[in-house]
């Protein structure tokens, strides 16, 4: 399977004809080639986007909305095909891709197709000065969108949909590890009637293709989701050009579990929030803090449930945990298990690679629970981004809050309690961008999404995303 760049509405080989191998994580085999695009490919994509911009930015909002909704419908009509492609590329269970990733990608287009019809500008009457101000929200021009491998199509479209809805044209790069569904999206866009050049997809390595997008002087905004170190690098490159930046970065999210919670719901959801997508979601709750009075019970029940999760081939319906995305990522995650042992962490379950019959070279790992001696150990401070969680007890609300906040990241937190005052206090004081109370990863696309501290800057979602992808221009008229 040869993946090609999608530029100006056409599939194209990379100019320098350099290709990268594409691996299937479930069996470790190479199953395709993707372009390793150069600066020249990015330049072509930019030119196509630039020439499409004049017309696209003047296209009525009704027409933009209609096309976005059509893309959404076509994704839904191709659900099985996209889910299988996503699973083969990423290692996630097909069932998960079918139930979550692809439907969410489709809903990104539907949501922003609708949202753009409601995105109003502000006006302010300057009473006493006989003037009226109104604020135009103008598309930026050509914008860059760079996304990671963990939720490939879902995060890719979370950027592209608001960008094009707002009248921009896009040069986008998915992770080179999971390029397949972004590649297939080109076909859908053509079928939906998206004018050529509005969306351009260039494949390749972050350090070459991604870097060329960030360095391009005429690509005026970058929306990036990925690791914190990459985000910091992008900020350094983009700052001297005063580019607009949205950075959604890593997390080390705490779960605070209090004895007064709805225990069964908490237990079930905590298994999911720990291991969904092999723990490779920036929102996974990777640090679990439990009130002392229920700690031993939780430990037993949680470990029993985790042991019952089935690690297996992503296409098998009973599989709960598929393959990790790549061999190098599997090695990185396993190293953290060794680090935990060296720091006196106790492996309560898991910790080993799994050999799946018939797929012996796949990248499988047991879901792993580590009881840690303190919150300062590396496995409680660094993002592992795999099927590994830590647990430890806390005595007081104050102690729980301190441990939750004592980390460089600040993406999300989950609270399990039925105590209203505690809910309100902790929600105010947690240093994160997203708090879930008695639930996890519930999605409402109108809400702002993003983190604080090393988890990033800016917000995606709803009108926040449309604001990011537009420039506000105020006009003041004296009458
Ligand atoms: P990376 O930061 O390695 O890569 C993200 C994207 O950036 C990829 O497309 C990558 O390309 C590209 N890239 C790498 N280097 C550069 C560069 N110098 N210039 C421009 N682009 C570059 O992250 P991962 O793909 O490993 O994704 C995992 C990370 O993403 C985790 O830290 C996770 O927490 C974070 N994440 C954050 C989310 C959030 O919303 N806050 C959501 C999901 C994930 P390539 O793949 O070719 O290297």
Image: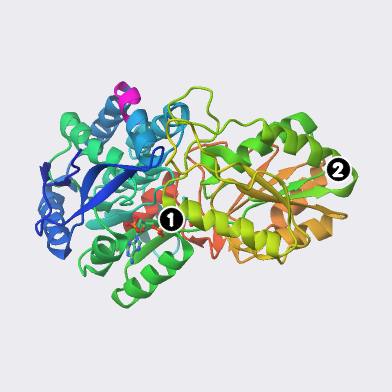
Q: Residue at x 65, y 65 (%)?
A: 378
Compared across the picture, whether 405 is left or right of 187 comes to: right
Q: Mark 1 points at which residue?
A: 328
Q: Which mark's residue is nearer the viewer, 1 or 2?
A: 1
Alpha carbon separation for disc pair 1 and 2: 35 Å
Write down the residue under mark 2: 296
**The residue tagged with tag 2: helix, strand or loop?**
helix
Pinpoint residue 436: horizontal percent, then vertical percent: 65, 43
The x and y percentages for residue 310 are 58, 30
| Mark with earlier residue (1, 2) | 2
Ligand 1's quadrant is: bottom left
Q: Quadrant of residue 1?
A: top left
Asked which secondary structure carries label 1, the reply is: helix
Q: Residue at x 22, y 32 (%)?
A: 188
**Quadrant in which residue 279 is drawn:** top right
Left/right placement of residue 308 relative to residue 469 reads right
Residue 36 highlighted magenta (yes or no): no
The spot of residue 380 in percent (x, y) is: 67, 60
Q: What stretch is highlighted in magenta?
A: 77-82
- Whether residue 98 appears in this view of the structure is yes
Where does the image place residue 398, in percent across and percent down from the top left? 83, 59
Is 452 situated above or below 415?
below
Describe the colour scheme in one phrase: rainbow
């Amino acid at each position: 399977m040869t993946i090609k760049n999608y530029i100006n509405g056409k599939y194209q080989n990379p100019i320098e004809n350099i290709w990268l191998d594409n691996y299937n994580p479930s069996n470790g085999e190479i199953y395709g080639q993707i372009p390793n695009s150069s600066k020249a490919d990015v330049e072509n994509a930019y030119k196509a986007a630039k020439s499409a911009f004049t017309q696209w930015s003047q296209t009525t909002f009704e027409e933009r909305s209609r096309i976005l909704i059509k893309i959404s419908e076509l994704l839904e009509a191709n659900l099985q095909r996209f889910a299988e492609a996503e699973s083969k590329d990423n290692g996630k269970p097909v069932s998960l891709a079918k139930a979550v990733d692809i439907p969410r990608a489709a809903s990104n287009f539907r949501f922003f197709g609708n949202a753009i019809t409601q995105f109003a500008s502000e006006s302010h009457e300057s009473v006493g000065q006989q003037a009226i101000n109104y604020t135009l929200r103008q598309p930026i021009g050509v914008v860059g969108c760079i996304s990671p491998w963990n939720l490939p199509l879902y995060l890719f479209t979370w950027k592209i949909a608001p960008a094009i809805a707002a009248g921009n044209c896009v040069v986008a790069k998915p992770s080179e590890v999971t390029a397949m569904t972004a590649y297939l999206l080109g076909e859908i866009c053509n079928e939906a009637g998206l004018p050529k050049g509005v969306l351009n997809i260039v494949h390749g390595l972050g350090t070459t293709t991604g870097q060329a997008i960030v360095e391009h002087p005429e690509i005026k905004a970058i929306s990036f989701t990925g690791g914190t170190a990459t985000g910091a690098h992008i900020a350094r490159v983009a700052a001297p050009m005063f580019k607009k930046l949205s950075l959604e970065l890593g997390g080390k999210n705490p779960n605070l579990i209090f004895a007064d919670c709805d225990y069964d719901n908490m237990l079930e959801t905590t298994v999911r929030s720990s291991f969904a997508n092999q723990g490779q979601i920036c929102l996974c709750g990777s640090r679990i803090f439990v009130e002392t009075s229920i700690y031993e019970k939780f430990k037993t029940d949680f470990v029993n449930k985790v042991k019952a999760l089935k690690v297996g081939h992503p296409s098998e319906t009973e599989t709960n945990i598929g393959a990790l995305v790549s061999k190098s990522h599997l090695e990185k995650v396993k190293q953290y298990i060794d680090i935990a042992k060296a720091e006196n962490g106790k492996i309560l379950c898991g910790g080993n690679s799994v050999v799946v019959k018939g797929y012996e070279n796949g990248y499988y790992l047991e879901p792993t629970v580590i009881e840690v001696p303190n919150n300062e150990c590396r496995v409680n401070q660094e993002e592992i981004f795999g099927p590994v969680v830590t647990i430890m007890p806390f005595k007081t609300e104050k102690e729980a809050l301190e441990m939750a906040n004592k980390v460089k990241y600040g993406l999300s937190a989950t609270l399990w309690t039925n105590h209203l005052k505690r809910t309100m206090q902790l929600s105010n004081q947690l240093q994160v961008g997203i708090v879930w109370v008695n639930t996890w990863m519930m999605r409402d696309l109108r809400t702002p999404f993003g983190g604080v501290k090393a988890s990033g800057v800016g917000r995606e979602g709803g009108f926040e995303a449309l604001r990011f992808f537009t420039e506000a221009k105020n006009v003041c008229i004296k009458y």
